[in-house]
Amino acid sequence: MSQPKIKRRVGKYEMGRTIGEGTFAKVKFARNSETGEPVALKILDKEKVLKHKMAEQIKREVATMKRIKHPNVVRLYEVMGSKTKIFIVLEFVTGGELFDKIVNHGRMREDEARGYFHQLINAVDYCHSRGVFHRDLKDDGLLHTTCGTPNYVAPEVLNDRGYDGAPADLWSCGVILFVLLAGYLPFDDSNLMNLYKKISAAEFTCPPWLSFGAMKLITRILDPNPMTRITVSEILVDQWFKKGYKTPVFEEKEDTNLDDVEAVFKDSEENHVTEKKEEEQPTAMNAFELISMSRGLNLGNLFDGEQQEFKRETRFTSKCPANEIIHKIEEAAKPLGFDVHKKNYKMRLENVKAGRKGNLNVATEIFQMAPSLHMVEVRKAKGDTLEFHKFYKSLSTCLDDVVWKTEEDMQQRK
């Protein structure tokens, strides 16, 4: 593997590939150079945060996450700041999103779904016991912000009259349990107003393969009246839920230091972390990063017409020069209705037409694996996963001559 001349580093963390993007933040894979531990590094633009008056909200959320130390909740290790950025160091969690597992492999058996639900309820119970809900509490003790994916939102959240965070969170847990067991959403409609009506009336039907115990529990959780909806303490003694349940044993330390949270927004140089510039060439992949992504890495031909898995990202390798790969992707994306934005060896493709979940945004990045071998990551940054899958299939056809094909691939095509 060729090594970069200058390592991209923030403090003691060596940065790697981008693993997620949002409106205000980007998440990169990184590792602690002192311990070798992999982490997820969330990077926020300080100017955007201040411009949108999000500083206090971020302080509260970061301080809250630092206090939450539970085996089923993603850990926040520390927060750092430079002159222009905020860096939040999070536990690196492998395995991807639970919903993707359902899309790719179908519904779960009840025992498997129950195991995931045990972890979810235990984590939610822990957070609620410390006054932490899906969004920050207001002075009147009721939440007012409508947040989250609409399909998972409780009826009382939609009426905008204020709601108790605990039962609203449990409703979302009930939707998740339904998805695990059924393989599809209990409330779904392409028309947002129709979706809201279904949620408000708790208009859903359990599939026939569910056991009576599972149906009964789901019905008690998806109760449109938050006053009569089942509580966590009642879930914990439910006969279906109790099967195989074990209370997690873990040691929780109370000495949480929040000094770094306040220091992030101070402009004094002494509070700034050392940040080294990114080099102007394709990022070189080292063995550590390749191992971390080996589950999703296929050095053969990834453009298999028979592949039906709906992934949020995929990768392919090419022996073409990096500039040629960029040119080919740009040539392929524009006729498909995408605006192309380039920076170094990264590209952002934005669909000018809105889809089911807004405009589809696709991020690509080129990594140098060897002097004459590159890996290209194609990732959904925003929008609908199924629309990303359709885009990827169209893109792959246009890039057929760019992808590196092994001898085995060539034999299969004959």
Image (cartoon, rainbow, N blue to C red):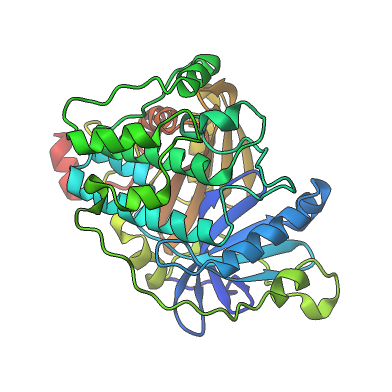
The location of residue 3, given as percent across then percent down, is 48, 73
The location of residue 202, given as percent across then percent down, is 42, 23
- Along the horizontal axis of the image, is 394 left or right of 256? left
Residue beneath the point at 50% across and 42% down: 167
The location of residue 121, given as percent across then percent down, is 38, 52
The image quarter in which residue 288 lies: bottom left
On screen, residue 396 above or below 81: above
In front of the other: 111 or 401: 111
Q: Residue furthest front?
A: 228
- Along the horizontal axis of the image, is 48 left or right of 373? right
Q: Residue furthest bottom?
A: 34
Residue beneath the point at 33% across and 53% down: 236
In front of the other: 229 or 303: 229
State the quadrant of the N terminus: bottom left
Q: Is residue 206 visible?
A: yes
In front of the other: 254 or 35: 254
- Along the horizontal axis of the image, is 389 left or right of 383? left
User: How many numbered circles are shown?
Assistant: 0
The location of residue 131, given as percent across then percent down, is 59, 58
